[in-house]
Amino acid sequence: AITAGVASQGQTLLGADIRFELNQREANVEETAFLEGLGTVAVSASMRSMARLDDGSDQALVEVKAVDSAYPLYGALETNPALPLDELLGERDGLFGAAAPELLFERLGVAIGDRIKLGGAAYELRAEIVSEPDAASEGFGFAPRLLVSLDGLRASGLVQPGSLVEFAYKVRLPAGAGDDAVEAVRAEA
């Protein structure tokens, strides 16, 4: 059953046809050109950090996932309320948006519209994450997810030399590309 599920939903579970990961650095110009030559690319960054209340009275460990505007390549991000990605995570009135599962709202005693801090930046919690299509590809999480934009993560100041951050480059190959295309990309990479 697991094998059949992966075979039928592998793209959604992985979030791509093929995925490349880099630890503690972003792709350079040459690597980015290679990836973009393969198809549509969605970039994300993942790291652990502490989210804290705006007044500093409480904090919680979070699994930060920062995504670009191409996210998700397969499947759908479901939030409550349902918002387009740019409204959910974009900058508005000087604050970036964020989304989190109900567990983080409970742990911090916050509600939609409240502010939290991550690193040196404040974020407005704009929705609850109901379903994250590629969550299985992110591995085992020790804490609730905090979804932000890549620009929002950069504003936090947390991404710097020595940060334990992983950049994922998820590629959607052109329509009709099969297993042979994936193997050819693997060999070329």
Image: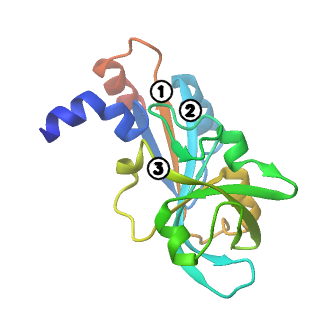
* Earlier-in-chain disc, 1 versus 2: 2
Residue 19 in the image: state x and y as whole percent.
43, 39
Q: Which residue is depicted at the point 37% across and 48% down?
A: 137
Q: Which residue is mark 3?
A: 130
Nearer-the-camera pick, 49 or 173: 49
User: Hey, which residue is sitting farthest top in the picture?
Assistant: 176
Residue 133, visible in the rendered structure: yes
Residue 157 in the image: state x and y as whole percent.
73, 68
Type of amino acid under label 2:
Val
Q: Which residue is depicted at the point 63% across and 66% down?
A: 111
Tell me the element at label 2.
strand
Q: Which residue is mark 2?
A: 41
Q: Mark 3 to mark 2: distance in Å? A: 24 Å
Tell me the element at label 1.
strand
Q: Which residue is depicted at the point 22% across and 30% down?
A: 7
The colour style of the image is rainbow
Nearer-the-camera pick, 152 or 105: 105
Q: Which residue is mark 1?
A: 172
Residue 139 is marked as none
